[in-house]
């Protein structure tokens, strides 16, 4: 059974159809990529999955259970973790404390387990040297890593990553891809929105192309990237 | 090391304060009683506004409810005023539940106005209570406070008048309440829930996405502070001995002054209310002869601090001394981590 599934999900902002009858299933442990031009409705789709937005129509199911009316914190506790495209750190807390909140609440870890679990994640994402730094003082790239780290601290079964590779150097990108691969290998289901296509396609096994809130095409990365309608919207982006 | 320093200084201060009724003049006991009660109210309001983002202008509702319930249990049922104080705190908390249901639908300035309106409704309602003197209020029977728990003992031990013994007992209760409240605030803010509250304060949307329920945490803080504010209100009016709706539900005395104390001391910091209450007390001693001018001066100082030192006097002070007696942070367990790695190696 699919771990996550969207059934006919639609969302309008006034007259603007931002999500238009989107349906797909995510298998347990699957890595799914989402691509599409700016404003295609990718981040909105994440907000509909996490409960930050309510759909106007359609259902979101987790483990076959309808969670459409659940709050973001309920969904987090059930195993949906996310990063924000524009990082949303807890500015006055340290990097470590940012993770600690996530581990103690969404991750459901006890006071005795959470500290080491958080440090393990920080070692893994390469932020351990900055763990006592205030999150508000971090530069953008470290903020993005913090987004990933904090999402991991909620111990998700499905993790939603929104453009975390943008702006990385080649070396950093390789590290990030290795981290996400290892998550995938551990069985965490992943949905990754990314404009850096070579990073994305080196991890995911399936791609969804969105345009104007609609699913334009679904398939393997090669199929989708080769399709003329996708090439048309992506012309010039991945040069 | 620093924790030992805080503990040592804290104990010394509490001990010194505890000796005041034994060696100090009665007027000082009465003054410091007010200061300690204001500190309790300020710690509560700081938790509400500084940490939970609930800028209430209606905390006088809980002061008044606590005080009136204590008067009711004492006058109508003949209970010990201290038992009435406990009931007063509990009733204030019970009534905070429906108030929260109403006020939590409002945001920001509307929340502030909503809580104020509720407090005024409470003032008008308690003013209808004929058995407690209606709008003109009433006084506690002399015997009730003289026979209050502990008063007889203190009278014999210190060899003082009943009135002085009542002042001493209420003073020690205020000192105890302030100390417990300070320690409890610190422990709460360092707990899981305190961490969640700080996350919500920084970014409510992100907090929800990592599993923190903002409404639940805020409701908890609202209920607990209503309890302590109610207790403090009852204690204040045991010492004052007289009650009127206007005095018990005074927005100036129990909320405006308290907001001033927290803002000048440093909102959202634990030592802030302590610094604030000391400054407030000093200003009051200096300026209280000037009446209205005093209130205007307080207002101007408050506005100046809000504009030029947003973190209050404590925010500036901590820069100079570089030492936070009540650190709220959680240090990353670096050493533990390394030792585990060494064990594995
Ligand atoms: N809260 C909102 N109110 C009104 N319009 C919105 C809101 N959020 C998003 N939009 C609009 O919806 C459309 C889709 O936005 P969304 O952020 O989902 O796009 P995206 O695919 O993530 O784009 P990008 O690649 O730039 O991140 C955009 O046109 C955007 O302006
Ligand atoms: Mg986006």
Image (cartoon, rainbow, N blue to C red):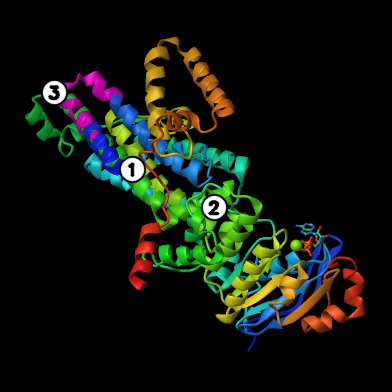
Few, some or many C-alpha atoms within 10 Å of disc 3 (few <14, some 14-19, many ≥20)?
A: some
Vertical placement of B44 versus A130: above or below?
above
User: Which numbered circle lies on residue B200?
Assistant: 2
Quarter placement of the N terminus of chain A: bottom right
Q: Chain of mark 1?
A: B
**In the image, the residue with mark 1 has its CB under 8 Å from the nearest atom of ligand 1:** no
Horizontal and vertical percent for residue B69? 34, 42
Q: Earlier in the sequence, mark 3 or mark 1?
A: 3
Q: Depth check: give the residue in front, A2 or B301.
A: A2
Instruction: Give ligand 1's quarter of the image.
Output: bottom right
Taking A207 as reference, is B2 left or right?
left
Q: Which residue is mark 3?
A: B161
A168, B26: nearer the viewer: A168
Q: How far from the left and from the top, in percent, is residue B145? A: 21, 33
Spatial distance from mark 2 to mark 3, Cα to Cα?
51 Å
| Mark 1–mark 2 distance (CA, rounded to whole Å) | 22 Å
| Label number found at residue B113 | none
Residue A71 placement, left or right of A233: left
Find residue B57 and report its horizontal and vertical position in percent. 52, 37
Helix or strand or loop: what does disc 1 sit on? Answer: helix
Is residue B18 shown in magenta? yes
Of tags 1 and 2, which is closer to the observer?
2
Residue B80: which quarter of the image? top left
From mark 3 to mark 1, how far is it between C-alphas?
A: 30 Å
Host chain of mark 3 = B
Eyeballing the image, is B16 above or below B186? above
Q: Which residue, given by chain and number where applicable, does mark 1 sit on?
A: B181
Q: Quadrant of residue A67?
A: bottom right
- Tell me what residue is drawn at x 58 percent, y 59 percent: A146
Which residues lie in the magenta part? Answer: B14-31
Q: What kind of secondary structure does the magenta stretch mostly adopt?
A: helix
């Amino acid at each position: 059974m699919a771990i996550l599934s969207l059934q006919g999900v639609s969302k309008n902002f006034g007259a603007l159809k931002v999500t238009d009858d989107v349906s797909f299933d995510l298998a347990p442990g699957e890595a799914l990529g989402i691509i599409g031009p700016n404003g295609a409705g990718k981040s909105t789709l994440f907000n509909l999955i996490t409960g930050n937005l309510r759909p106007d129509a359609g259902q979101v199911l987790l483990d076959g259970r309808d969670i459409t009316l659940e709050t973001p914190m309920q969904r987090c506790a059930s195993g949906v973790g996310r990063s924000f495209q524009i990082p949303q750190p807890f500015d006055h807390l340290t990097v470590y404390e940012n993770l600690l909140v996530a581990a103690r609440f969404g991750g459901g870890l006890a006071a005795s387990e959470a500290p080491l679990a958080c440090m393990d994640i920080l070692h893994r994402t390469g932020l351990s040297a900055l763990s006592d730094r205030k999150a508000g003082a971090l530069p953008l790239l470290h903020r993005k890593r913090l987004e990933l780290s904090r999402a991991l601290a909620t111990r998700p079964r499905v993790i939603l990553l929104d453009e975390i590779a943008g702006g990385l150097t080649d070396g950093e990108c390789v590290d990030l891809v290795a981290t996400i691969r290892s998550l995938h290998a551990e069985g965490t289901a992943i949905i990754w929105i990314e404009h850096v296509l070579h990073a994305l396609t080196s991890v995911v096994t399936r791609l969804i192309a969105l345009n104007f809130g609609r699913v334009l095409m679904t398939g393997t990365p090669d199929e989708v990237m080769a399709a003329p309608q996708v090439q048309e919207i992506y012309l010039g982006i991945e040069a | 090391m620093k924790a030992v320093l805080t503990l040592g200084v804290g104990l010394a201060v509490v001990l010194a304060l505890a000796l005041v009724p034994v060696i100090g003049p009665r007027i000082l006991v009465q003054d410091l009683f007010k200061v300690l009660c204001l500190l309790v109210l300020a710690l509560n309001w700081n938790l509400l506004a500084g940490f939970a983002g609930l800028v209430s202008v209606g905390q006088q509702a809980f002061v008044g409810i606590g005080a009136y319930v204590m008067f009711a249990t004492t006058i109508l049922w003949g209970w010990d005023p201290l038992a009435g104080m406990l009931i007063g705190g509990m009733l204030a908390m019970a009534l905070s539940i429906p108030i929260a249901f109403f006020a939590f639908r409002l945001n920001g300035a509307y929340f502030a106005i909503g809580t104020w309106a509720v407090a005024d409704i409470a003032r008008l309602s308690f003013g209808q209570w004929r058995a407690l003197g209606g709008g003109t209020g009433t006084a506690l029977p002399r015997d009730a406070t003289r026979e209050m728990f502990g008063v007889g003992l203190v009278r014999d031990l210190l060899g003082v008048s009943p009135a002085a013994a009542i002042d001493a007992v209420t003073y020690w209760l205020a000192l105890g309440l302030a100390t417990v409240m300070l320690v409890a605030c610190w422990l709460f803010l360092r707990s899981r829930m305190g961490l969640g509250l700080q996350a919500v304060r920084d970014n409510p949307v992100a907090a929800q996405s990592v599993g923190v329920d903002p409404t639940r945490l805020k409701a908890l803080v609202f209920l607990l502070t209503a309890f302590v504010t109610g207790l403090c209100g009852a204690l204040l009016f045991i010492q004052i001995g007289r009650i009127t709706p206007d005095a018990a539900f005074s927005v100036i005395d129990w909320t405006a002054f308290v907001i001033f104390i927290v803002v000048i001391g440093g909102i959202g910091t634990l030592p802030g209310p302590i610094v604030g209450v000391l400054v407030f007390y000093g200003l009051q001693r200096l300026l209280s002869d000037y009446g209205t001018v005093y209130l205007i001066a307080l207002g101007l100082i408050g506005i100046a601090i809000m504009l030029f030192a947003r973190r209050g006097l404590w925010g500036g002070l901590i820069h100079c001394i570089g030492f936070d007696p009540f650190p709220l942070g959680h240090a990353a367990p670096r050493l533990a981590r390394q030792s585990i790695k060494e064990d594995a190696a």
